Amino acid sequence: MQRILSTELPAHVGERVRVAGWIHRRRLLKSVAFLILRDGAGLAQVVLTADDVRARLDELTEETVVEVVATVIGNPAAPASVELIDPEVRLLGAVAVPPAFDLYRPVLTATLPTQLDHAAVALRHPTRAAALRISAAAVAGFRATLDAARFVEVHTPKIVGSATESGANVFALDYFGRPAYLAQSPQFYKQLMVGVFERVYEVGPVFRAEPHDTVRHLAQYTSLDVEFGFVADHRDVMALLRDVLAGMVSAVASRAGDAMATPGAGLPDVPAEIPALQFTEALAVAGAPADEPDLAPAHERAVGEWARREHGSDFVFVTGYPMAKRPFYTHPDPARPAYSNGFDLLFRGVELVTGGQRLHRHADYLAALAARGEPVEPYAAYLDAFRHGMPPHGGFAIGLERFVARLTGAANVREVTAFPRDLHRLTP
Amino acid sequence: MQRILSTELPAHVGERVRVAGWIHRRRLLKSVAFLILRDGAGLAQVVLTADDVRARLDELTEETVVEVVATVIGNPAAPASVELIDPEVRLLGAVAVPPAFDLYRPVLTATLPTQLDHAAVALRHPTRAAALRISAAAVAGFRATLDAARFVEVHTPKIVGSATESGANVFALDYFGRPAYLAQSPQFYKQLMVGVFERVYEVGPVFRAEPHDTVRHLAQYTSLDVEFGFVADHRDVMALLRDVLAGMVSAVASRAGDAMATPGAGLPDVPAEIPALQFTEALAVAGAPADEPDLAPAHERAVGEWARREHGSDFVFVTGYPMAKRPFYTHPDPARPAYSNGFDLLFRGVELVTGGQRLHRHADYLAALAARGEPVEPYAAYLDAFRHGMPPHGGFAIGLERFVARLTGAANVREVTAFPRDLHRLTP
């Protein structure tokens, strides 16, 4: 007899079926006992009346893995209006110790550090698992949108020879006796691959030796990276980003709609045109002094509220950041060279995406590094490609965990990360 | 005027169009010159007759990026039977130095080390780019097959606290002042996630400090990892692997059929049932002594030839490897405990996949470590999950670069890797 899933039970009323999963909860009443079985699809109620089965209830503690052969009957009061009677219960995986916290309660009551210490168990809770299902759906939508626009997926090195992007926050490692570093982004490699495929994306881990303990930084996170050529300027990049976000939100709705049905979670509308403010306008909207060089988190929240209030949008672009605050590969605004063709996208008041047009001429790279007083040598392998013909191009990177945290309403990105890595946490 | 791709030209005969790309080759005849333009989709021929354009040919060297506005006419002798006349050529990205080798020849004549030294340029060659398109298509097929079977994609830590899987070949790094290691596989994490979702997969980098210089080992490669619960034994894992391979081959055919049209490349048939030999039978087929503890590469080639000869199959399973040669988490064959429920899949005579059933009982893990004289401590966080109820489960890992190398006939995995990392190579 083939195993079926809990969600398939309503189609089998009157039949003898085989199900399997974890004992989510036991309920003991005077003359009857219930086992709530949790499988990869949902929950099912098993009714125990026979004395020999009820006698085993001490053994069948929460989280025990069992297989149940039983008869499906209708019961409007049970999950999905069916329950399983006359069960034969077979033990598949015993429990050695009870979990450190109850998984069957609607909300996990353990503190976040305790949940993270016991991640393999805590993630079994439906709310924690839901976030990871949303994450998987969002990535599927990211890829589907880009595949349809003839982007090619690439895989680039995570071990690099020089700490180029930001020397301070980089992990150093021993590479066959030589110093090497974990890549902080696939930025340079995705640019090089524009020379090969015009349009590329990568989904992969990036590493930041982030010395601060905040609710939105991790030492490893999943970056959704895009880069493409033959753009007029950053506005082409923003237009693509808009479509990618729409594809991600749509995939979450269609592939993880159930997972979004938790308190605090909510899918945004992605407007056909996301409202945009120039950096100087954003400062004014946020009530910040006009000579501020960057937007502080409080300013970002204010700009997010403005977008919500004035445009009914959860998303807002801030464009034209000062060049001094952007990486050296950023393309300046030809009309205002102190400002960049770079942008941030704020989602519900938090920076979610950074992107923009990049330099594409070799001479411009040399000039940009010289202007910043940076040596060329660490970038030699990267810059070489720009001597061989590169088109105007740009791209962006979406932080997956930040996106999912905003969707689910999680206050801390660690809540939506399976096994987070940070200043203090290296296990599990 | 919207830019169109070279492959769209036949639908625009008689029209004025805009195309863009790299100058793949110049051909200078007495009264006419041709530019062959390469874009993300293919090649297009541009005919230059006007003196002012021809005068610019010295500037328009190979790999220069240009935009061309021209008129499409039919020409049976040109690529796709069309060419572009009366062009206006606009420079988008100049070339500073010529490439170290010609990209327009049918085969790259540079040695592999030279190609790898100039990877960003070498990958522009159609044969090198084709391998990466095949790679992207194979991964898309992997995901599509698993998504349809309700697997959930996960992202797991690449920085781990102990060098558990194989102490010797691990990269050490400095993690905020503490020792840490790059993950050699997501093995433990994907097993833990079976407790959450039943069925999971991950596509991501794995790291091996491989001290040998071989044609099939890299210090970083892309591992396609699968793990799922509620299996009867390793045969359920083999059946899923068969379907995943069929999905990957089918996706390569449909998404990268053109890329496979290179000499030496060929798609295999995936038989409905892949032939399988028990380990002891495989030794006999290979003519190896019956007490050999493992299959050497020459044995694997002989087994591959056997499968081709006897079953017309490019794939063959070898099952029941001795437990002594498999990792401690491998499930033994209950009928012959010295042999495992683990398998390898050989593809065209080379090991492509390792997989099997895993232990799922906490007590079995403790016994397995004790029997090997290994301490429990480094595995503590991993083993903890097995105290909380785990189903019988198994899985496998496919090496993406090895798969693509076999498909394309590449002798060295570095030929199908964008920016390989090995004992000697850390850049570009």
Image (cartoon, coloured by chain):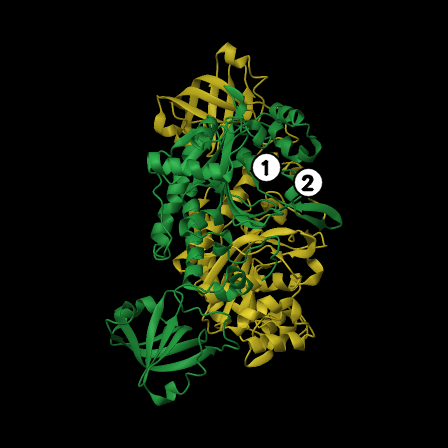
Chain colours: A green, B yellow
**Along the line of sight, which residue is nearer the eye, A95 or A229?**
A95
Q: x%, y% of residue A351?
A: 48, 40
For marks 2 and 1, the one nearer the N-term is 2
Element at badge 2?
Answer: loop
Element at badge 1?
Answer: helix
Kindly indicate whether the residue at mark 1 contacts the one at mark 2 (C-beta within 8 angstroms).
no
The chain that hosts pointer 2 is: A
At horizontal 38% and vertical 86% (from top left) the residue drawn is A53
- State whether residue A272 appears in this view: no
Q: Is residue B221 left or right of residue B273?
A: right
Q: Is residue B25 left or right of residue A108?
A: right
- Residue type, numbered disc 1: Phe
**Along the line of sight, which residue is nearer the eye, B259 or A302?**
A302
Q: x%, y% of residue A326?
A: 56, 32
Q: Which residue is mark 1?
A: A188
Q: CA distance from mark 2 to mark 1?
A: 12 Å
Q: x%, y% of residue B269?
A: 46, 56
Q: Which residue is at the far top?
A: B51
Q: Which residue is mark 2?
A: A162
The chain that hosts pointer 1 is: A
- Residue type, numbered disc 2: Ser
